Amino acid sequence: MNPPILKAMSDITLKLTVSPPPHWRSGRTIQGMMQAHLLALVPAAAMAVVMYGYRAISVIGLAGTAAVLTEVVCLRLQKRDVDVDNYSALYAGVLFAFLLPATAPWWLVAIGGVLTIALGRTVFGGFGCNPVCAPLVAWAVCRFSWPSAMDIDLNLANYMINSPVDQLMYFGVGSLRQFDYMDLFTGHQLGGLGSSQVMALAAGGIFLLAARWIRLFIPAGFLIGVAGTSAIYWAIDPTVYADPMFHLLAGSTVFGAFFLAPDVASSPVGKIPQTVFGLIAGAMVVIIRTYGVYPDGVPFAIMVANLLSPLLDRLRPKYFGVR
């Protein structure tokens, strides 16, 4: 029989055994988080329906359904519990739909929904393991594979208004006189189904910040990165480069700041890493729009920043007392 003192020490050892961090217990669930994010997207979805008609509902519904069914199939093939009731697959599918033109063909929407889960999440281990924002993986595959079906201006040519980022790329700063900033803010611009509804997306993002479902560091860093980088170019030559307000309101900048960049699996954790992550992604948006071949640089900019997340997580303040 062990001495009493050893038995006591053994009990203490067991009690001090802890799991890997983080240890913050908030009582919140993945289901609650996804429900809040879906609720934050409702205003943008409603504005998309007002602008594009009921076709917008079919695109969002088909993408979400394809993502959920793919999640069920993948989980069963892996012999894991089917937990699609946490709405994470539905949310990922809706995010992908928001990046599509409203007239996207049904087969493209379905393929994108499948790729969002199968290629964007499952191959990396499932929800929480993906190193890149899952809807952006599907968007990139579809953009490279079927560029004409993903082209905003081409698919929405019957609308009298134009895509501002396409106009900037192909016709220069002089063509931007046709756009009023208030119109851009209220969503009167061609773009992704929901990603161009700036006012509604900003309201949804503020709701997520107020409810503390996302932190301020990534959205603020992202928007500052876009505004700061575009301000530098604009100061160099305003006749060649667009002003910061245009870059903030055009395309999917606000959508990326509040919904794509803060993806919990593919973004850094600490305050400093998140701020730097947002600044890098925001700066990349303007650089891609200036030198790249794709009009809206938001998806690619966030994907590049996602790949830097493991390195950015190493940016942390020194421990107290360490020089």
Image (cartoon, helix red, strand yellow):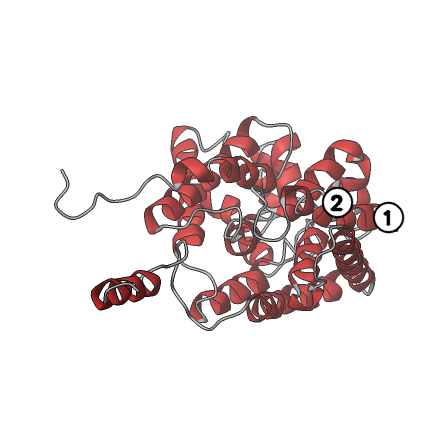
Up-down relation of residue 217 to residue 32 (above or below): above
Q: Is residue 306 left or right of residue 8?
A: right
Q: Is residue 16 above or below residue 107?
A: below
**In the rendering, at what x and y percent does residue 285 appear?**
52, 38
Q: Residue 95 location, x and y as percent?
A: 66, 55
| Residue in front for this viewpoint, 32 or 98 | 32
Crowd tier of the residue under label 2, counting other residues whose Cα lies within 10 Å: few below 14, some 14–19, many 20 or above: many
Q: CA distance from mark 1 to mark 2?
A: 16 Å
Element on which disc 2 rests? helix
* Left or right, 185 with reference to 163: left
Instruction: Select label 1 or label 2 by which is in front.
Output: 2
The answer to whether residue 157 of the structure is visible from this angle is: no
- The amino acid at mark 1 is Pro
Q: Residue at x 55, y 32 (%)?
A: 288
Residue shown at the point (21%, 65%) measured from the top left:
5
* Image marks 1 and 2: residues in contact by CB distance under 8 Å: no
Q: Please determine whether, in this image, residue 152 is positioned above or below residue 293.
A: below
Percent x, y for residue 69? 80, 58
Q: Amino acid at mark 2?
A: Leu
Instruction: Quadrant for the N terminus, please.
Output: bottom left
Q: Which residue is mark 1?
A: 105
* x and y percentages locating residue 315 in the rendered image: 32, 40
Q: Kindly identify which residue carries mark 2.
A: 115
